[in-house]
Image: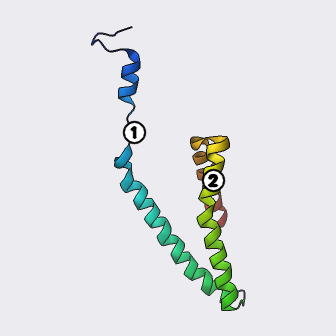
Amino acid sequence: MDNEKGTSSSDLTTRQRKPLGWKAMPYIIGNETLERLATFGLMANFMVYMVREYHMDQVQAVTLINTWSALTNFAPIIGAFISDSYTGKFNTIVFGSIAELLVIFFYL
């Protein structure tokens, strides 16, 4: 069925939905940059905290911090597998955002 301009309704829906593409890249790069900055800042503070408060050896503290860093860097691979296989990208993003928000409030 054609509308007044001679295009079908399926053409209109495909024209209205445009992916953001490169327009979203500055936000993604900014978010990742600030996240990495916070992570590296926390790693230095964790080192001092573990040595002073928990009386750990520096080698043990560095080993624990590097293990934590490795696990957090590989976690997106597990999240991508779960998202692609079971839940879908939007449900995974919503669940991850809520979980991260709860963790932030729990530690504040």
Q: Which image quadrant: the N terminus?
A: top left
- Residue located farthest toward the left when viewing the structure as drawn: 5
**Residue 108 place in picture, x, y as percent:** 62, 66
Secondary structure under the numbered disc 1 in the rendered image:
loop
Image coords of residue 46 (percent x, y): 61, 80
Res. 87 visible in picture: yes
| Residue contact at pointers 1 and 2, CB within 8 angstroms | no
Neighbor class of circle 1 (other Cα within 10 Å; few <14, some 14-19, many 20+) is few
Q: Which mark is residue 77?
A: none
Tell me if 34 is positioned left or right of 46 in this view: left
Do we see residue 52 in this rendering? Answer: no
Q: Nearer the viewer, residue 11 or 58?
A: 11
Which secondary structure, mark 2? helix
Q: Nearer the viewer, residue 103 or 43?
A: 43
| Foreground residue among 9 and 81 | 81
**Disc 2: CA contacts within 10 A as few (<14), some (14-19) or many (>=20):** some
Provide residue 2's location: percent of width, then percent of height. 35, 9
**Depicted 1 relative to depicted 86: above or below:** above
Residue that label 1 marks: 19
For the view shown, which residue lies furthest in the top direction? 1
Mark toward the start of the polypeptide (1 vs 2): 1
Q: Report the residue marked by disc 2.
A: 79
Which image quadrant for residue 5? top left
Total numbered labels placed on residues in the image: 2
What amino acid is at disc 1?
Pro
Position above or below: 85 against 48: above
Q: Is 91 left or right of 26, judged from the image as shown?
A: right
User: Which amino acid type corresponds to the residue marked 2 in the rendered image?
Assistant: Gly
| Residue at x 61% of width, y 44% of height | 84
Q: Nearer the viewer, residue 12 or 47?
A: 12
